[in-house]
């Protein structure tokens, strides 16, 4: 599987959306340089209050640009960075990846996928009704899956820019499906 980076975003302060930039620097074991969610331990504002010492499995948020296409068909105009992601991709089945998949971005950076993004209710403050559009329900089992991207940790740092290639390396089988982190 190969795709490309469509956009990169970061924000130094807690805010739902993140402004786009010409490049971001990924720091091994930490996340996106200059992003409020970078760090070895949890940086999610709500979760820090009750799990402050847990490892940060949400160092980098990746979202597939194809989600924006699907949301547009339902009347929601969303663009890169607006849902808080750091890396927006095109042509990569992020939601189909197993836990532990490696993503090579550009010439240097390597991310390890840790799980699904668990969107919070603030998404409805951004666009009313949007939360209901970023998960799917299996009609047979009733199980639901989040569709608002994946989370990853930085295994090897580097600079990432729009247009960079994204290459996927699957872990050895058996593959573990993504769960929310």
Image (spheres, rainbow, N blue to C red):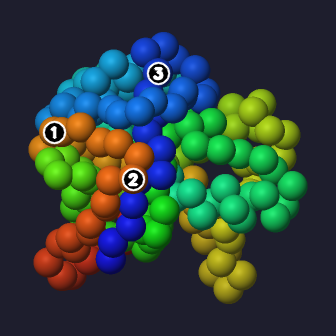
Residue 144 rendering spot, x and y as whole percentages: 62, 66
Residue at the location (35% across, 34% down)?
23
Q: Earlier in the sequence, mark 2 or mark 3?
A: 3
Residue at which label 2 appears:
163
Residue at which label 1 appears:
157
Q: Badge 2: how crowded within 10 Å, few (<14), some, or many (20+)?
A: some
Q: In the rendering, which numbered label is found on residue 11? A: 3
Contact, mark 2 vs mark 1 (Cβ under 8 Å)? no
Residue 129 rendering spot, x and y as whole percentages: 83, 46
Residue 2 rendering spot, x and y as whole percentages: 33, 72
Q: Earlier in the sequence, mark 3 or mark 1?
A: 3
Contact, mark 2 vs mark 3 (Cβ under 8 Å)? no
Residue at the location (75% across, 33% down)?
126
In this rendering, position of residue 88 left or right of residue 38: right
Q: Badge 1: how crowded within 10 Å, few (<14), some, or many (20+)?
A: many
Q: Nearer the viewer, mark 2 or mark 1?
A: 2
In this rendering, position of residue 102 left or right of residue 43: left
Tell me: residue 16, above or below residue 91: above
Residue 145 rendering spot, x and y as whole percentages: 57, 65
User: Could you tell me how far apart the alpha carbons at marks 2 and 3 are, in whole angstroms?
Assistant: 21 Å
Q: Nearer the viewer, residue 75 or 149?
A: 75
Residue at the location (35% across, 42% down)?
161
Tell me: residue 10, above or below residue 150: above
Task: Report which quarter residue 66 is drawn in.
Answer: bottom right
Q: Secondary structure at mark 1?
A: loop
Task: Report which quarter residue 96 is drawn in.
Answer: bottom left
Quadrant occupied by the N terminus = bottom left
Q: In the rendering, which numbered label is found on residue 38? A: none
Q: Secondary structure at mark 3?
A: loop
Residue at the location (21% across, 70% down)?
169
Q: Nearer the viewer, mark 2 or mark 3?
A: 2
């Amino acid at each position: 599987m190969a795709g490309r980076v469509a956009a990169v975003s970061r924000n130094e302060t807690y805010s739902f959306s993140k402004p786009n930039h010409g490049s971001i620097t990924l720091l091994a074991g930490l996340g996106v340089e200059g992003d409020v969610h970078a760090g070895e331990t949890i940086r999610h504002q709500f979760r820090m209050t009750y799990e402050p010492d847990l490892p940060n499995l949400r160092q980098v948020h990746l979202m597939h640009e194809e989600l924006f296409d699907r949301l547009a068909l339902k009347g929601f105009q969303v663009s890169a960075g607006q849902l808080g992601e750091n890396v927006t991709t095109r042509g990569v089945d992020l939601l189909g990846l197993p836990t532990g998949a490696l993503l090579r971005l550009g010439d240097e950076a390597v991310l390890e996928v840790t799980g699904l993004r668990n969107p919070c209710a603030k998404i409805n403050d951004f666009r009313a009704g949007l939360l209901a559009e970023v998960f799917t329900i299996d009609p047979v089992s009733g199980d639901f899956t989040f569709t608002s991207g994946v989370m990853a940790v930085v295994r090897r740092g580097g600079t990432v820019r729009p247009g960079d290639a994204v290459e996927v390396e699957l872990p050895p089988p058996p593959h573990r499906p993504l769960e929310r982190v």
